Image (spheres, coloured by chain):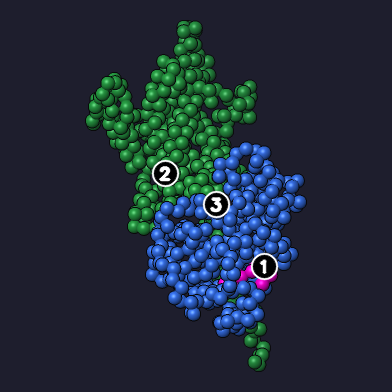
Chain colours: A green, B blue
Amino acid sequence: MNETADSKHPFTIPDRKQFKKDLTKKAVVMFFTYFIVVFFAIIFADIVKKGFPVVFPGFSEKGAPLFDAEFFTKMPGTLVAYEDENGVSHRKDIAEFRDFTESNPDAVIRKEHRYSYSGGGILGPLVGTILLVVICIVVALIIGIASAIYLSEYSSQGPLMRLVRLAMLNLAGVPSIVYGLFGLGFFCYAFPIFTTEVADRSIFYFQLPGTSTFFSLQGFGTSMTAGGLTLAAMILPVIITACEESLKAVPMGFREASLALGATKWETIRKAVLPYALPGMLTASVLGITRVAGETAPIMFTAAAAHKDQLPWQNLNGGIAAIPEFFTQSVQALPYHIYTVAARIPQSEYTKPMQYGSVFVFMFAVMLLAALSIYLRVRARKALKW
Amino acid sequence: METATQTPSTSTQAEKSPISASSSGEKAIVDIKDLNFSYDRKKDTLRDISFPMYEKEVTAYIGPSGCGKSTLLRCLNRMNDLIPSAGVTKGSIHIMDQDIYAPEVDVIELRKQVGMVFQKSNPFPRSIYDNIAYGLRVAGITATDELDRIVEESLRGAALWEEVKDRLQDNATGLSGGQQQRLCIARTIAVKPKIILMDEPCSALDPIATAKVEDLINQLKADFTIVIVTHNMQQATRVSDRTAFFYLGELIEFDNTTKLFTSPSKTQTEDYISGRFG
């Protein structure tokens, strides 16, 4: 090679323009990647900015308690806003307002406005969501772990198994509103139950001979059971897949060692496989909880009530007899409550605190659960190394 | 379960039989006859395998990869049952005079008599004690003092007691590779099998750990019948009494280890042990 004055060394950048074009492309893809951080930051900042003062009023408002415990201990109620004779505006819960007007009949009330669901706290929705999630996760884990054990340990590949997997894949893709309607039709109105009172909606029923109990296809009505089961049906594909992955991650050597020591198949599953798959299953179920806790569509027809005066366990005629009654009540739920205060009532500055406060609490609860699942996973990885 | 077709044991194939090891009146604890085995029911992985294994001896299986030695080993405790389509297609295996593929055989009981140590040491990620006690608890032994006694006995039997006696409650995965493999041997002898199958137990171990396991095999010979699959021909000469050489799914030669390695009767055996192929 003969080097002339303008010919360059083969390692040097041949064309500055080309080089810069490449850099521009890198910048473009990077820009879109960081977009996700921007989205998160905007949502997070907005909710914290407007929600934090609702839960912790003491930081921004002088004289207010540092932590507003009432937000967590009161049921949602109507908010009354008014001005007194000096034009000072006041906000009171409907109950407080009634007490106030009764004890001060001469008080001047001007510009009185009432805002539904915007007063009080979020105790009812919080409790309802917890109940729904507990029912959902218990049912989903029982069915999910059983199915995963069958799929991973017993079944052999074949057309039937391909059908099961196809069904799971499709179930995972069904829109949540469809699950809601399915839950309404099946769990609320048609699920077979044993009862002493047959409802009008019963499709089919007969009395069990010699008892006062009926077998009836009438469902649970709008209730936390129907809602929890609907959520369970929705989360099942995810739980089964996650549990199956956890089982498959257990080394084949454990199964072989156990069988070679004279254990039966079931003993092997119970003692040499399940214990090492459980942490993974728990992690998956915590992540499942964070998902179902936020679902609105599946519960809005099946379980959720916008308004409730009492917690589910209040006003029950005690004892074991009250258990069916307890589980067949409708409940308030956080996502539905947020939907109600954000979209079903006229908006004003007075409805904002309830909206942002609820979302703030909800978001932090979900983030805490996600952190818990990460913690569980890390701890399990440390304890179970193979 | 798949039942092997019972073939009458005839000695008509005496001159083409690869077996020349003198049984000298010893009792065969394992007797394989005309065995064919297939993974997919189409092509036989093992063909016409016939040879005996004798009580309280070490029998080594050697041969190049894919020759079927591990497959045959896994036939002896029916570990191959785990593979859905696999099974014996011809012939029989008698262990202690019982056809182990007969329908009346309880595989669980068979495996209690025919233990297995695997290529990759596979202790459960729980305590050393619990690892040894696993098979005992499965067998229904729950009394603490009895468990303690057998755990110690087994660990001593596997030459591991002195190294781990102060940390029986530690996680077994914290042991070194060689210790883990000896723990797996201890776990196997704890259930007191008649036969121990070892599938390349030293392939992942360093020479010092290997020597320890080999010493252990020589000790265990006093109480157990051992069948060991190995890639390492020197290991076969060091530990075994008899050796079976397999090639492409067939038994080429079975003889006293010394004889097989010094004056093999088949050219394939000679080519393999002299390193001409494999």
Marks 1, 2: nearer the viewer: 1
Residue occupying image coordinates x 68% and y 42%: B148
Q: Earlier in the sequence, mark 1 or mark 3?
A: 3
How many numbered marks, from 0 up?
A: 3
Residue type beneath disc 2: Leu
Work out whether disc 2 and disc 3 sit on a shared chain: no
Q: Say if mark 1 contacts mark 2, CB within 8 Å.
A: no
Classify mark 2: residues with Cα within 10 Å, few (<14), some (14-19) or many (20+).
Answer: many
Instruction: Label 2, secondary structure: give it.
Output: helix
**Subunit bearing disc 2:** A
Residue occupied by mark 2: A236
Q: Which mark is residue B112?
A: 3
**Subunit bearing disc 3:** B
Q: In this view, does B202 lie above or below A174?
A: below
Residue occupied by mark 1: B239
- Is B37 in front, or is B90? B90
- Is B278 in front, or is B89? B89
Residue occupying image coordinates x 71% and y 51%: B156
Work out whether disc 1 and disc 3 sit on a shared chain: yes
- Is A365 in front, or is A231? A231
Classify mark 1: residues with Cα within 10 Å, few (<14), some (14-19) or many (20+).
Answer: many
Residue B69 drawn at (x, y percent) = 54, 69
Residue A348 drawn at (x, y percent) = 45, 30
Image quadrant of residue A316? top left
Residue B213 drawn at (x, y percent) = 69, 61
Residue type beneath disc 3: Lys
Residue occupying image coordinates x 55% and y 48%: A272
Residue occupying image coordinates x 59% and y 69%: B24
In space, the residues marked 1 and 2 are separated at their CA atoms by 54 Å
Q: In this view, does A76 lie above or below B131?
A: above
